[in-house]
Image (tube, rainbow, N blue to C red):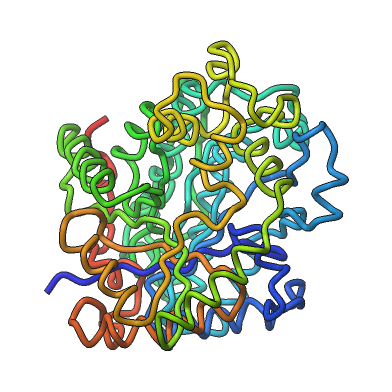
Amino acid sequence: MRQMTLIGFLQAQNCTNFAASWRHPDSRTDFLSVDYYQHIARVLEAGKFDLAFFDDRLAMPDILGGDHGHTVEHGIRCVKMDPVTILTAMGMATERLGLGSTYSTTYYEPFHVARVFATLDLMTGGRAAWNVVTSLNSSEARNMGRTEVVEHDLRYDQADEFMEIVHGHWDTWEDDAIVLDKQRSVFANREKVHRLDYEGRFYSSRGPFTVPRSPQGYPVVIQAGQSGRGRRFAARWGELMFVMYPNMQVGARATAELKQEAERIGRDPATMKVATLIHPVVAATQAEAEDKCAAIAALPTEDDSLSLLSEALNFDFGSKGMDEPFTDAELASISGLQAIRDRVLQDSGKTNPTVRDFIHYSGRGQLHDPWVGGPKEVADRMEQWFEEGGCDGFVVAATYVPGAYEDFVKFVVPELQRRGLFRKEYEGRTLRDHLGLKRAERGDWRRGG
């Protein structure tokens, strides 16, 4: 029977993607400690989650007003520790939970990224995943020594080459290359370790790579591209798709289109899992969950939304009045997450939406469309999305940490298991086992494009 994918959505800082979560009275404040993250990992593994996944950016939000003061004062995602280091610590506290992190193709070198994730994959027994992003705002560019952001579509052109190099390096070592024959002094078969010698338009990388292959072949690739060029990139490279769909009808259509695009370029759609973001607020009963949600919904501020929109769309939302429409030129100038811009245009029905429209329809910074209820109500909604083609699974974003994950594991997971929609035990050891994806063999990535 087809099984749901469940992913815990995390950030290596004082909050989740819901920036106000740190203000909740029950949120833990020791987010600079290893115990904080290891506890979350143990909770997710107890709930048999496929994966714990870290979002990340290379700058704190400081585009609103051109200053970081409000971000620091109000705790709007101002702390951003290195997530791979934290994943290593989480891996030491767990045995089966998948471990995924964001890493940018814009500001790192392919060889470095290939080595980081191949090493994490080995050290966790084949549980690693890489969320591929093309960095999108000017604050990140300045932190990384650049003067401006690379144009949107060009970032993806560069990223295609980046991915070819990374996968090429992951293929460098054949599975049986290591011999370890002490008597003959043969560590590995020299004929089974290869150089890449890649020369492209944007990158070159020689090799040979320095990390042997892992139990799952190579790390799972996570992708979130939902714009036109981003979707083509995702269809080529993504194995686990992180999406944000406003409703089930849109989700079913977009999921089908994404898998059709993958099939068009020669991929088997079965090698791709699509998981949509949800903010569940759950308790033993509907009434208790509604009371809990009312308290959570009161936590965000207007600055949360303005700051996070400015960061994501690379545009200073403080430069306009709340009810001032965007001009065509301003909308065209947005160089960040264009999928957010496109969703606001579509859902608002306006050619020139206002700042207030962006706050309302993007959900950025606010508790947007929470799934509120007891075990039955939340599981009903998840089952409907899953069975009617809206997605293959869910990215569960906590409204406060760690309590929201504990609530979900306590109340919703047993109900999903009772319905046969979710595993009761892990059936394998690697992340690919959990996701129902076969082990990655050398050359598997050479498909379509």
Q: What quarter of the picture does the N terminus occupy?
A: bottom left
x, y percentage for residue 225? 41, 39
x, y percentage for residue 255? 24, 46
Decide: is 355 above or below 384. Answer: above
In the foreground, 3 or 154? 3
Q: Residue at x 59, y 20 (%)?
A: 326
In the foreground, 191 or 373? 373
Q: Residue at x 62, y 40 (%)?
A: 108
In the foreground, 126 or 265? 265
Instruction: Tell me where residue 174 sits by quadrant.
Output: bottom left
The number of discs equals 0
Q: What quarter of the picture does the C terminus occupy?
A: top left
x, y percentage for residue 447? 23, 38
Residue 304 located left or right of residue 270? right
Decide: is 51 above or below 167. Answer: below
Can you name the residue that lies furthest to the top here? Answer: 329
Residue 327 located left or right of residue 442? right
Q: Residue at x 45, y 44 (%)?
A: 166
Q: Residue at x 17, y 38 (%)?
A: 260
- Can you see residue 273? yes
- Can you see residue 172? no
Decide: is 419 above or below 135. Answer: below
x, y percentage for residue 204? 52, 29
In the foreground, 377 or 413? 377
